[in-house]
Structures are given as C-alpha cells and as structure tokens.
Amino acid sequence: MNTVLSRANSLFAFSLSVMAALTFGCFITTAFKERSVPVSIAVSRVTLITFSLMCIHLQSIFDWNVKQLFLYLSAEYSTKNNALNQVVLWDKIILRGDNPRLFLKDMKSKYFFFDDGNGLKGNRNVTLTLSWNVVPNAGLLPLVTGSGHMSVPFPDTYETTKSY
Amino acid sequence: MLDVFRSIPTQMDYKGQKLAEQIFQGIILVSAVIGFIYGYVTEQFGWTVYIVMAGFALSCLLTLPPWPMYRRNPLKWLPVQESGTEDKKPADRKPKRHSKS
C-alpha cells in the first residue's frame, strides 16, 4: 500500500466485492416471493381469436429486483396423441415504470393459430391462460401462470386463410 | 512526461497505510449498508449502486493522495555510517600493490 496504484488496486477490488455481496442480497430478498396474481380473460370471437384481458394487480409484482415483465397469452388443448399442446397467441413486454394496469378489450391475436396436426378441429375444450416471465436485476427468471383462465369450444370447420 | 509523475512522493509510513486501509474499508461498508437500505425502501436497485459509487469516490479522495495525517510516524532510519570496507563492491577491490617499496 505504499504507492498510489497499490492503494487504488486494493480499494477498487474491495468495492467490487462489496457490490457483489449487495447484488446477492438483492437476489435473496426477492427469491421466494409469490408472483402469481389473478387475471380475467374473455373471448368474444373464436375463429381468428379476439379476446379481452383485465388485470389490475400487476403492480404488486414489480419490486426492486424486477426489470420488466414478459406477458404471453397461450392456448392449451389436448389431443389423442399428446396430453398437452400449447400455442402462444399474443405477447407484450411491460417495462418498469410503464402503466401496469391491463384493460385490453377486443384484441386480435398477434400470431396465427396454426393447427399442427388436426387436433383443434372440433375440440371441445381449448383453454386460454395468461402467463408471464419475470426478468430480474439479479437471480433466476421465474415463469408464472396467472390464476384465471377461460375455456372455449372450437368450431368444427377450418377457417380458410384470409388476407389481413 | 512520466518522470514528472514518478517524482511526486506518494509513500506513506506503515501506521499511515493501516489507517488508510481502515478508512476506506469503513467508508465503503457504511455506504453499502446505507445504499442497501435506501434501495430496498424506494424499490430501486439503481440507487444502491449510486450510493456505493459515491462512497467509492469519497474514499478515493480520502486515501489515494498522501495526506499529512498518514505521515505522522515516519520510519527512523539509522544515520549514514562513514566506515569504508562494507561499502566497497567486490568488483572494485583491486589486488594490493606495493607501489612504494
């Protein structure tokens, strides 16, 4: 510690170690938090899915360790080949500081709902759920499902592709 | 140009080095605790980082330059000794010549 460089080296290394310990502390304080909130979904049109979403409790998920939320709406159904199929219809990114109250009415799906293997035609029970990925500052990325869902029967004929 | 920087005296004595180390460790730990609590309360981790960086800058200012408080216990060097035989390097020793005989 006799020269400036040696003091600067030891000071900088100590600061970085302290910063790493603080980041670990930030992770530990939010690692075991419950991140699922109730969501309400309504479907107004089944072919070319149009839906409405409402969720007012997303603000409680944002804490000091959350950078953004990645939301996606997925449709789940079962066929005789597979017990569970999931298709993502729509997604959205909510950054910290954006308005977290969702009141979306009559939204069109962002992605085409392809029927991969004839399982959807005439399927009695297709469930739409909203899930999200919590992107943190430090730590793991939990994948959480919202606690509300909506089941819809599908029609018996396919819709031919129209131009959007 | 580098010689100008090398000629600035930057050393501290041993007690001064120990004092400097205690000072910067204390400042950074205190600013880390303050920053952690403030960031937790305001729910923004960015403030924790800013407070720790401010603590780092403050301790740079206090411990990097050699302030006089770090030089209060200088080492006591022995006085310069005048005896000749220990100072000669072996290469300088020439074989003794009896020139005047």
Image: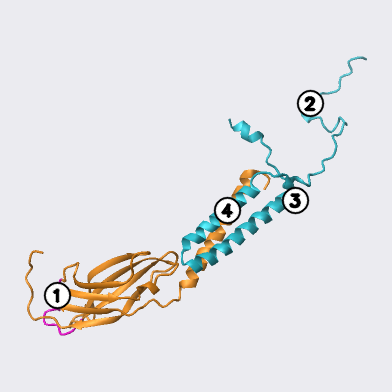
Q: Secondary structure at mark 4?
A: helix
Chain B on-screen colour: cyan
Does A97 appear above or below A148?
above
Q: Residue most toward the right?
A: B101
Q: Which residue is mark 4?
A: B56
Distance between mark 4 and mark 3 Cα atoms: 22 Å
**Disc on the earlier residue, 3 or 2:** 3
**Callouts 2 and 1 on one subunit:** no
Q: Position of residue B17 (x, y in %)?
A: 70, 50
Q: Which residue is mark 1?
A: A117
Drawn side of residue A17 relative to residue A119, left or right: right
Q: Position of residue B55 (x, y in %)?
A: 58, 55
**Of tags 2 and 4, which is closer to the observer?**
4
Task: Identify the image quadrant of the N terminus of chain B.
Answer: top right
Residue count near mark 1 (Cα–Cα under 10 Å), binned few <14, some 14–19, many ≥20: few
Distance between mark 1 and mark 3 Cα atoms: 79 Å
**Disc on the earlier residue, 4 or 3:** 3
Going by the numbered disc 1, the residue's amino acid type is: Gly
Taking the spot 19% from the left edge, 70% from the top edge, the residue there is A109
Going by the numbered disc 4, the residue's amino acid type is: Phe
CB under 8 Å between discs 2 and 4: no
**Residue A116 counted in the magenta span:** yes
Mark 1 belongs to chain: A
- Foreground pick, B77 / A147: A147
**Disc on the earlier residue, 2 or 4:** 4
Question: Which stretch is magenta?
Answer: A114-126
Drawn side of residue A99 relative to residue B9, left or right: left
Does B42 appear above or below A43?
above
| Residue A128 numbered tag | none
Q: Position of residue B101 (x, y in %)?
A: 93, 15
Distance between mark 2 and mark 4 Cα atoms: 53 Å
